[in-house]
Image (cartoon, rainbow, N blue to C red):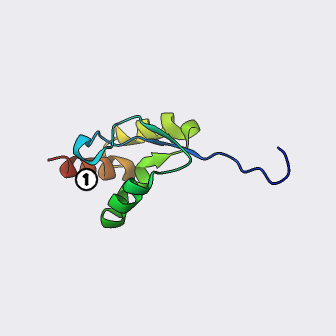
């Protein structure tokens, strides 16, 4: 990597789709979480944990589908935002 260059941050949203908030399951964001999502997450800070690095998506999806895990609980909580 050249001196002074920055690593591009990518994150993938693994929670349930919340179309009215502009969040779709599996969306990958280059450059980190978009500003409008950060604003949403300021009112719902648990959403931040549903954004993972692309290489962690597989493990996150297993955790989200496993009853009793933290990500499962956060995903269930996020589903209530879409109502």
User: Label 1: which residue?
Assistant: 77
In this view, the residue in front, 14 or 33, is 33
Q: How many marks?
A: 1
Numbered disc 1: secondary structure:
helix
In this view, the residue in front, 67 or 21, is 21
Farthest residue, direction right: 3
Farthest residue, direction left: 83
Please give left or right for residue 8 compared with residue 56 in the image. Answer: right
| Residue 37 locus on image (x, y percent) | 38, 54
At 27% from the left and 48% from the top, the residue drawn is 21
| Residue 73 locus on image (x, y percent) | 30, 51
Please give left or right for residue 75 compared with residue 38 in the image. Answer: left
Q: Which quadrant would the N terminus be assigned to in this image? A: top right
At 85% from the left and 51% from the top, the residue drawn is 3
Dot 1, how many residues are within 10 Å of its Cα: few (below 14), some (14-19), or many (20+)? some
In this view, the residue in front, 26 or 19, is 19
At 42% from the left and 36% from the top, the residue drawn is 27
Farthest residue, direction bottom: 43
| Residue 79 locus on image (x, y percent) | 22, 46
78 over 63 or under it: above or below: below
| Residue 25 locus on image (x, y percent) | 35, 36
36 over 27 or under it: above or below: below
């Amino acid at each position: 990597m050249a001196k002074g260059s920055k690593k591009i941050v990518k994150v993938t949203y693994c929670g349930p789709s919340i179309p009215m908030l502009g969040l779709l399951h599996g969306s990958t964001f280059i450059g980190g979480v978009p500003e409008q999502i950060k604003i949403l997450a300021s009112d719902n800070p648990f959403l931040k944990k549903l954004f993972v690095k692309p290489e962690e998506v597989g493990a996150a999806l297993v955790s989200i589908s496993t009853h009793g895990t933290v990500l499962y609980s956060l995903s269930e909580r996020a589903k209530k935002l879409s109502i």
